Amino acid sequence: MSALSEQPGLYFVVATILPMVSFLLLILTAFLRHAARACDSPLCNTLYRVLGGGRPGRTAAYVATTAIALSFVCSLVGAIHFASHGQDHHRIEELKEEAHHLESEFAHRPVEEHPKIEKELQTVNAEIHRLESKWVGRIEWANPAGPYGTKKDARASILYVGYRIDNLTVVMFLMVTLIATLIHIFSIGYMSEELAEEVEDHQVHTADGHLKRRGRFGRFFLFLSLFCFSMLNLVLADNLFQVFVSWELVGICSYLLIGFNYERQSASNAANKAFITNRVGDAGFVIGLLIIWTYIGTFNFEEIFKTIRAPLTDSHGVRPLRTKIDGEYVPLGARIVRANLVVEDGEKKLVPSQTGDQAVLFSPKVHLHVEDADPGDETDESKWYLKSFYPDFDSTDSMPYWLLVAAGLGIFVGCVGKSAQFPLHVWLPDAMEGPTPVSALIHAATMVAAGVYLVARAFPLFTAEALIVIAYVGGITLFVAATIAIVQTDIKKVLAYSTVSQLGYMMLALGVGGWVAGIFHLITHAFFKALLFLCSGSVIFGCHHEQEMTKMGGLFPKMKITALTMLVGVLTIAGTPLFSGWYSKDMIVAQSLGYVRLHPEHFLLFLLPVVTAGITTFYMFRMWLMTFTGKPRDKHVFEHAKESPATMTIPLIVLAVFSICVAWGWPLHDPEASHLNKVIHHGQPHHVLADFGGLAELGELEHAPGLVFKHVERSERYWALKLHGLAELSAFVAAGIGVIFAFLLYYQSRQTGKTRLDPEEAREQFPGVYALFANKWYFDELYSALLVRPALRVSQWCKAFDLRGIDGVINGSGRCTVTLSRWSGWVDRYIVDGLVNLIASVSYGVGSWLRRVQTGYIRSYVLFLVLAAIGVFAILSYFLAMAAAG
Amino acid sequence: MSTNELQAILFYLVAAITALCAIGVVVTQHIVRAATWLLFTLAGTAGVFFLLGADFVAAIQILVYVGGTLVLVVFGVMLTAQSPFISLRASAAEWAIGTVVGFLLFGMLAVSLYSANWNFPEPGQTASPKNSMNSVVLGESLLGFEEATPAANMTGFPPGAAPPSRKAVAYLLPFEIVSVHLLVVLIGAAYLARARRRRQATST
Amino acid sequence: MTVTLTHYLVLGALLFVCGALCMALKRNGIGVLMGVELVLNGANVNFVALAHFNPAFAVEGQIFALFVIVMAAAEAAIALAIVLNFYNNHLSVDVDTAEELKG
Amino acid sequence: MLLAVSETMLETVWPYIRPLIAVIVLVTFVALSAVFFIWVERKVAGRIQDRLGPTRVGGRFGWLQTIADGIKLLVKEDIIPASADHILFRIGPYVAFCGSFVAFLALPFGDGVVAFPMAIAVLFMLAVMSSEVFGVILAGYGSGSKWSLFGAMREAAQVVSYEVPMAICVVVPVLVAGSMDLTAIARQQTGWFWNWLVFHDPFTFVAFWTYFTCATASCKRAPFDLAEAESELVAGFHTEYSGLRWSFFFMAEYASMFAVSGIAVLLFLGGWNPGILPFALTDAFGPVVGNILNVAIFIVKGWLLVFVMIWARWSLPRLRIDQVMMTCLKYLLPISCVLLLGASLWPLLMPDSVQNWFKYVVAIGFAVLFFFGFLRAAVRSREPFAPMPGIWEYQSRSASRTPAGNS
């Protein structure tokens, strides 16, 4: 506990680890259970029964829910600590400036004063460490270079695991743990069908009817726990590599949960699609990581930002760094500096230039000093230059600018994949194959928001070119997805496209510099989209897994709680004033309006969100109306529909309350007064201001660094207020049009079942547009034609080349060898052997003439023997007779 | 009818059976029948041994030849019994030559037997069952004893009896050699006859 | 009408001749084996007859006969093993197929 | 003169006539005893199988059943299969018959009551009986039927194999007695039953059982009757035989059963001596009366052993052919070799007192055991037959069971 009070950041670490503990507990239990089932002994049988036996139990759900609820509690406690230590961060920044300054003093002061400076430096450093360690910590995780790496390499060869708690982290933690807890509770009800010992999957047909399998209740919560850990770890991470690892972990969880009913072809296809599409994005992510690793040498966010962004002041903490833009000098504070490295008189200088193809890296070891103490003298072009504090000022201090752009875009590509942005948005609608709580948690509230989160987290990394790409990608995504959502009939698909569209809003906001707006919308969207998904889940559960809205209708009296909470969600997403969506969405529109005002050539970035606000309202009301009002379209579904149990409705109510109130502040009508907005605003990095904060205003900065923020805050507030009115108005009008159309087209009276306008007619009037929307802008077909089929074709070519070309050459050479061998063999056989055989055959002929003496029959030998005996006897007797006679 | 006459009658009877069956062995083309004639030939030979007072040899002849060797031979016949081999015939020319040679050989032997002058001290006792060679004597000579009391208990000499004297020439060593030989033969036969993969048959 | 040694010896000679002819005329390997047995029996008759008629040879004759019987059994075992081996190799018991030594 | 001539003739011819007479007597005896054994076997089989056996022919016990069967066999048509080798088919039964009957020539039924006294009687009997197998082979081959051939080959392999341990087991008492003359061996066992060679030392004791097993096998009796295993080979080597020829085989079988039992009695069980008198019967009652008693005792002992064979046949299941061969070659042969070695070492290594005491203790202990066993069996047999767990009762019980109820 004392460790926790000393280092309150550890609350969040604990909150992260808790789901992991739950996951490990569950998976160990599962392993043990399986092991116990495998062997047959009384002990094992008992163990098996104790661990759940053959029937899935609710224990896993309780463990996982408890863990995530505890996580929420930890996050809350940590957040309270964080709020009460709000001043620490400023203090740390000040101390760091001081330390930096003290270090630079060594060069200027005489040697006698060095011990004194050292002592001061030590005190300052100790204070920095004390304050930092409250919210920051890291441990060495891997050192690929090992103990043999040189000192220079050592910095770049160590991978850390660490955490850094800031406003963004805290907000994200609260949001993720709260929603995850509610969804866990909801899931206990929703997944109750999986408690059966044998679940029949009506969508999978086998030879003998439908597939029957064991219930996977425990497995679901196992995956959820792993996911929660991964997501929290992603948010917690203080470095890109840790983010990447968690990124992949949430990816695999998403894969596992989309494919939860993996026996269904559609589910397994969707899981694969999600996985592969994400891999495309991750390829970009990895490219970005490698560029950063190569040129910056660290993955730690803070260090990266410090390296690529210029400091606010010089190393003495007195003068703002300036450069000349359009003939006048502007401060360089917190911006990416494009400059060329020049060596003059043995001194290395950076010559600032807008056309410079190098981005300067501000290594902490580089001493910055503004030469000219007089700000009035602006004729000198070399107002500022760099001196290396240490003599080994090397090439890592600058990097090609285009590579920095590429790094930012690479990481953004990863976010595109994860957040389902155009053109990698195709997987998210298919991911609705997963159970609805999964859609709510992973594919609406948290994981898909991780892309947006990462863009926000890595915001200083993005150059202006990258940001405009982000903005346009977001704009295209939000419009395209909204148009597709209009024609969807599957209730979850509507919500899926809505999610894509809303994520596009966030991306757009980030791209146009609305860092706060983007994150704000991320939080509010997480609540109301989770609510909407859970409501849809409740509907689906109530209607026995019927997802087609064309079979629903008139469900309002049957499930009032669901309908009302869903109406709250619809109103929120539609931007009804005083609902949380209103604050965040209007803020985005206002932000884009502000950007367009500065850059009128990008007027689309304002037009698209405004129009889409109307479309959003239209399709959301369409969905609600089709589901809950009018005449029931399918008697069967209607008759069986019923309200869900309390475990499901209570989370809905809680989420509805949050959807309404999460963004409230006083006065209610002022979005800038929202508490959530303020909290996020405090976490906004300086670099946002540097890029979008209004250059003119920044030019009027005072010299003292402390003044910068106040000034910017004030100016932005002023700037935002001027634009909010217009943005609100336009969005409200668009939304109103959307509502009207929705009611005209889809509100049926209960008696007649007729609408004012017939959707069929509308469809027939715009057949091309309808086809375009219904076919999702032909993205799947396009990818199939552009990527899948060419890949297959190329593979076939390769195969054919392999078979005919390579094998042909090999076989041909083989045949040549055989032919040559034949000739050689002929010579060998008939000329060389011929001589030998001639000699042999002569010998053979002689031998065969001689061999006739021997018959080879033992019987004849016996006869010969007898004959010989007779002959001997005859001769003997003859001689004996002769002898007797003689 | 004197004992000699009876003896002669028995001899001629047994000898005739033996000789005829021996000729039958040669003449028959059927291998199993040849084995049958051989059985009677061997039995007849055993009968001749009985007539010669060699009961033990006769019994061994029956035991070993009839009960053992001949059964073994028949086993061989059965194991290789395929219709073409049951009766393999030699050619007529071979038969002619064989017959001529056989008569020549027999004639030669008979002539030499009849012309031989056997100088035995005294023709031994007439062969009769009563005077059959005692198997004890055979056993003693095999072991190398000249004389032994044909007393009942051969295992362990009775306390009072004098141990028999040694004979100069004994057949103990040949006996041992034969027994070792038999063992070698057993092992060799087992080795030779063990089942092996058949090679492709040559033309028969 | 006394049966003399010569009678027995002629019987032995007859058995011997039959055995020799049997060896010469049987193409069946087992037939050859039977011929060998006959030859040995002829010799045995001679041994036992001589043992009977020559008191000096009384024991030796019978013992030689016993040895011959034992040897014949051993020979039969070996010869049968050879025949079986022969049969395994040639799929025949016709000794004329074993003519590899033909010149 | 005529009388003188006839007397001289009688004197010279008597040694040759006597065996002829004896042979006639023996053939009659063996044929009659075969008739008797077949009847006994049927009755015993009936008793063991809980049925009655023959009951009608010839009165109360059906004791003429065999005669009736014999007459039936005599008048049956003599069938020779077309594919048979006629000569061998005809010769086979006679060879088998001769093989087992000639053995009786050397078998003494009493002291001096023997057809052809021989110094090597045991060897002669074994030798002659071993030739019986050749008749079986001829019959099997000559029948031209594969079942017959299989049966004959099995028979030959089995009998030839079992003769080896049997002969070695025979050598054990021969070694102890120092003679191969059965009469001499039986004379040595005169007196109390501990003089019987079976109780002479532990090795002869075991040798008796081993010999009896081997003898059963070489008579191709159950449980070693693989040669005529009905379940596999129809009837083995005599499948194709019928009528009188068939009955010759059976006569041969029962004859050799009695022959091997007789050898066992003479070698191990005191021969014709009653075993419960300290003197020879011929000494006490003179040669004629004593020998009549002797013959009676000998025949009863032989019958008892034959009865044991019959008993075993109906009690024990048939072995498999490989088990039969394995039993012989892997167990009985080594056992008999050990017995021979042990029996030759026992008198050399053991003090006389130990030898004597062993004899008494084993003999008396065995006798007591036998007596009590017999007594128990006798007492039991006097009890009325309890209703046996008959097959019908069992079936009704099993039928009343439900498949699930397995309590």
Image (cartoon, grey):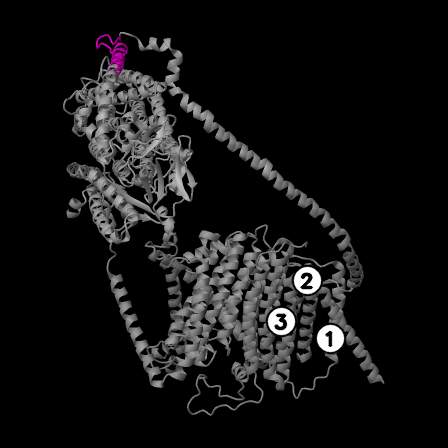
The answer to whether residue D394 shows anywhere in this view is no
Distance, label 1 to label 3, CA atoms, is 19 Å
**Left or right: residue A521 compared with residue D190:** left
Chain letter of disc 2 in the image: C
Q: Are marks 1 and 2 on the same chain?
A: no
Residue A357: horizontal and vertical position, in percent? Answer: 43, 33
Is residue A744 magenta-colored? yes
Is residue D222 magenta-colored? no
Q: Nearer the viewer, mark 1 or mark 3?
A: 1
Distance, label 2 to label 3, CA atoms, is 26 Å
Main secondary structure type of the part rendered in magenta: helix
Looking at the rendered image, the quarter that the C terminus of chain A falls into is bottom right
Quarter location, residue A396:
top left
Residue at left 15%, top 21%? A668
Residue A69: horizontal and vertical position, in percent? Answer: 18, 37
The answer to whether residue A779 shows anywhere in this view is yes
